[in-house]
Image (cartoon, helix red, strand yellow):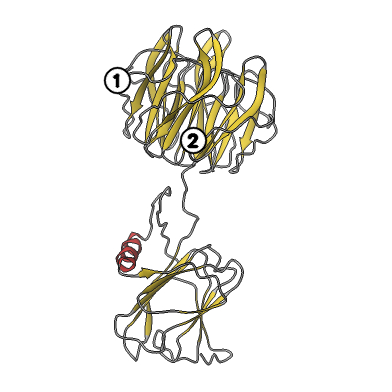
Amino acid sequence: MSGIAGSKLNIRGSGRIAKLGTDGQALTSAGAGMAAAFEDLAGGVSWQTIETGSTMTAVAGNGYWVDTSSNACTITLPASASVGDTIIFTDYARNWGTNGITIDPNGLNYQSRDDTFTIEYGTDGMTLAITYMNATQGWVPTIDEAVADVPIKLNDEGIFGFGSGAATYSLTNLVSNTGVVATDVTGVGTARHQLAACEYGGDKGIFSFGTIDATNLVSNAGVVATDVTQVGSSRSGLAACGYGGDKGIFGFGHISPDNQSMTNLVSNAGVVATDVTGVGTARAQLAACEYDGDKGIFGFGNDGSVTNVSNLVSNVGVVATDATGVGTARKEPAACSYGGDKGIFGYGASPTKVSTTNLVSNAGVVATDTTGVGTGRNSLAATQYGLDKGIFGYGTAPGPTKVSMTNLVSNAGVVATDVTGVGTDRADLAACSFN
């Protein structure tokens, strides 16, 4: 390429937005046609290993993941081409805005311009597909779109935190993306129990309320922060879940001497809002989980006696009136999502301790009882892990004995037998996913 000073063809992409989905990522699109076109093109392309060098030579019919984390890259096109030849380049590390790529047409035209122009692309998250048209037009971009934002990644790790047993704790236990519970992490924040936790921001979590007024944010690496002043009415025995894809909601609970139905929304920055007037039956010792990817459900609990009513939460955080109860009425169950768009309530006391579960469809419909698996217990917690699976853990078993045992939930909602407990035996804790 004989680049001439002042003859630059700086190409930054069309600016149309498209979020391209991969495993564990949400697929949304303001340029859906481009996504479909890319899939059609990519289907006939031979994808190569990741390119990290400062120079590379492209071959027609290939696709290249170009990683410019360490350096810019000059790409030399084939010296000859046939009509319909296609090559695809994709920004592997979303770094072309810092270290871009330069295209060397190698003697052929590019968008009708001869080889005296410098052709540069410098937009993070870009995919560039070029096709050879003819000698006059040369190589022509057929796709030059950029992913505007990092695609939403469903949380694939979890954390159990706080609780009570031989003492009141602030310690936590991380859950890997394969459902393995880690040993205790030294507690951060004020020790307490009967609190709740949920996800926010797409990759972080939050613990709040309980027997002590405090809120603790969880980073996308599972690190619990020191206390933040709690917002909203102090209460215990409440529940929490995600909604809207990146926000959360705390709801219900007990303020002596009365149960409550009030809620507090959590922004995608982890800010807890003031009280929202309650909807539905006031109760405590309930559970909540997300379903359908962006909605939530509160269910079961104690309204003076055990109950099985539920309340759906819309994708804008609006709580609906009571839905007729389904399944065994009980208090102190746990709940989490599974399968990417469904949920599960499990365990609890009715008043005897049970291991019964109730699946929640992606339309928010609670199913009848599924025969329990594992040790019946109450005052436990549950969280999603591995993108589409769940885990129940800890609680009070018959005795009453505090335990640390766990039960994994498959992506089909099947609960597995007891796994030997890891970490401090305790109950009245909370859990959420992160990362």
Dot 2 falls on a residue whose secondary structure is: loop
Task: Please give the name of the residue rendered at 52% of the width and 35% of the height, measured from the top-left corner.
Answer: 180
Task: Please give the name of the residue rendered at 57% of the width and 27% of the height, measured from the top-left corner.
Answer: 422
Q: Label 2 to label 1, Cα distance in Å?
A: 26 Å
Dot 1 falls on a residue whose secondary structure is: loop
Q: Is residue 300 visible?
A: no
Image location of residue 77, percent across then percent down: 44, 83
Between 265 and 241, the one nearer to me in the picture: 241
**Which amino acid lies under the numbered mark 1 shown in the image of this protein?**
Thr
Q: Quadrant of the C terminus?
A: top right
The mark found on residue 368 in the picture is 1
Between 274 and 32, the one nearer to me in the picture: 32
* Disc 2: CA contacts within 10 A as few (<14), some (14-19) or many (>=20): many
Task: Give the mark nearer the N terminus: 2 vs 1.
Answer: 2
Q: Is residue 330 visible?
A: yes
* Disc 1: CA contacts within 10 A as few (<14), some (14-19) or many (>=20): some
Q: Which residue is mark 2?
A: 179
Tell me where residue 30 sits by quadrant: bottom left
Task: Please give the name of the residue rendered at 50% of the width and 34% of the height, measured from the top-left corner.
Answer: 248
Tell me where residue 136 sits by quadrant: bottom left
Q: Left of 407 or right of it: where is 363?
A: left
Image location of residue 395, percent across then percent down: 53, 18
Task: Please give the name of the residue rendered at 56% of the width and 7% of the height, measured from the top-left corner.
Answer: 257
Between 215 and 24, the one nearer to me in the picture: 24
| Above or below for 265 versus 118 | above
| Above or below for 106 versus 285 | below
Q: Which residue of the protein is positioned furthest toward the front in this rendering?
A: 420
Marks 1 and 2: in contact by CB < 8 Å? no
Image location of residue 25, percent across then percent down: 43, 49
The mark found on residue 330 in the picture is none
**Of tags 2 and 1, which is closer to the observer?**
2
| Above or below for 171 versus 16 | above
